[in-house]
Image (cartoon, rainbow, N blue to C red):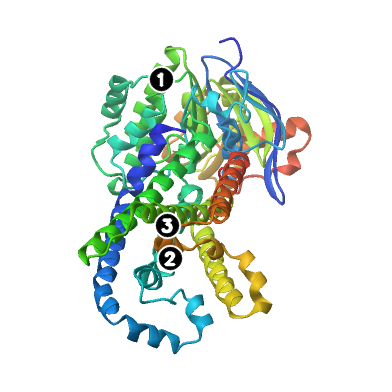
Amino acid sequence: MSLVMFRRALADLRWSIFWYSLGLAVYAVLIMSFYPTVRENAQMTQQLMEAFPKAMMDAFGAADMASLSGFVGGKFLNVMWPIIVGVFVIMAGAATVAREVERGTIELLLSVPESRTRLLLAKLAALLVGILALVAVTVGALALGAALVDETLGLGKLVALGAVLACFAVAVGGFTVLLSSFAKERARPAGISAGIMLASYLAWVVSGLSEDWEWLKYASVFTAFDPQRALASGAVEPVHLAVLLGIGLACTVGALIVFGRRDAIS
Amino acid sequence: MGEAPIRLDGLTRNYGKRRGVTDLTFEVEEGEIFGFLGPNGSGKTTTIRQLMGQMRPTGGIASVFGLDCWRNATRIKELVGFLPGDIRLYEKMTGEAFLDFFAAFRKGSHMRLRRELAGRLGLDTGQKIKHMSKGNRQKLAVVQAMMHDAPLLILDEPSSGLDPLMQVEFVELLREEQSRGKTVFLSSHQLVEVERIAHRVAIIREGQLVAVEEVDRLKKVRERRMDVILHQPAPMQRFKDLEGVRVVSERVEGKQFELAVRGKLGPLLRVLGEMKVDDLSFAPPDLESVFLHYYEADGRADQVAEPKTEVRR
């Protein structure tokens, strides 16, 4: 990995990381501050939830709204967090190769005595730092928010949550970077990645609605994404994390190979 | 180092339907300033991108100091200072940060050389790149290419965007680099520019090598157009009798002539000196006439259209 490129790439991402972190932290604390109202009316909340079809509530991650993990999951982690962090990861991941090609700066960048692999690895390392920063801020803000409303989230739960969130973002980052490595402009990999995310989410929702459609869950990264469970029990499904990390890693290797062989500019 | 700074051997790059370059073979010798001349779209940049390992050849070999440009792309870049043809820079950086960034990839900072180059080109490196004029961007890219003290400079259309005074300074810089043993490979679509700087040229047209020639020899074969307006009519024969002079057109009853001049100017100027000349313009040397010369020699003259003659009254 090229350290010079890493520092530059991190500097390019620093303001994005800062603003996304701030947004996530504020959102997490804000959501948490509403929790006492739900906690105090637990029975009523549960009755309200039961009025909706269970499958639908499961699908949108909103079952069990009365518990802390259920509330934070339904209101923040299950859907909102993937959207917010997905935007960051997709925009930054799509930029890695495609923006340099689009802006024509790739020609100068590839005139430096560094291999393409080391240059791209440095950019990916900066993206990984960004992902880990957002995950750390999310977990930290939730712990802080919980403390403010007299709840305690144990270290085990927080670590489990962090692992799930990070692995998910790594998977999204992986396929976005792979798409970017082929592309000539950033909008294309960003658009396709966002499309994959949406399709993946829909597949996951539909797979829960009927047994006929259950097979669709194997086509969705959201199947392996269960932050609510991690927060509730501190338990994670190792296979799920391995699948998410595997997607991220395999796509990264693919991106390095594609970028190493492509015409930088044509 | 022993090995030629640049060697192309049958270098070919196909783009499918679009034209690439075909079977380019030539060598650049150590310590020379070598011009790579051709019209826009003739394949100069495609060739240079292959030299810089940014594009893989579909056939043949490009090597720098004996190293294959694709397989040893990282290594060769330690030996090359590069100026791209289409200057695209990191807009948000200041000039200083931009130069720091590119210097950091290499050993040694060469700060003194960098300041000297910026000073001689009159470049303020403190400015943000997005606020720089086209000329200043070009200067910044030139400083970036030259500041590494690399033994080979590969410069794609280096003087485009530089004003005439800066072009003179730039040529001076290249001559100094050469006197310090550096090799310079520069592309251009302007014959006059290459003639001013280079010792030898490779001429390319439609992706194919037309000739590799010494500049002194090139000057003997290329034509320049001269428009002459005389006060009194003169017989066309006076010009026709001169060696290397061709009358392209005669207008206004023998008072206006368009001449194509090849080789020495002296005899023509002596004839003109005997006439009363109202006006005279002399165009820069014409690249098409060079193609015509080499294609005639090859019996392929029909591949080059005769340069259009503008009709004026």
Query: What percent of the width, then of the height, locates residue A13?
Result: 35, 49
Question: Is B129 located above or below residue A215 in the figure?
Answer: above
Residue A170 in the figure: left or right of residue B132: right
Q: Distance between the residues labelled 1 and 3?
A: 58 Å
> How would you rate the neighbour count of disc 1 (Cα within 10 Å): few for under 14, some for 14-19, many for 20 or more?
some
Q: What element carries label 2?
A: helix
* Amino acid on which the number 2 mark rests in the picture: Gln
Residue B88 in the figure: left or right of residue A30: right
Q: What element carries label 3?
A: loop
Question: For mark 2, what is the residue?
Answer: A228
Residue beneath the point at 36% across and 38% down: A7
Q: Distance between the residues labelled 2 and 1?
A: 58 Å
Checking the image for residue A234, the label placed there is: 3
Mark 1 and mark 3 in contact? Answer it, CB < 8 Å: no
Dividing the picture into quadrants, the one containing residue B95 is: top left
Q: Which of marks 1 and 3 is in front?
A: 3
Is the same chain shared between marks 2 and 1?
no
> How would you rate the neighbour count of disc 3 (Cα within 10 Å): few for under 14, some for 14-19, many for 20 or more?
some
Q: Is residue B39 visible?
A: no
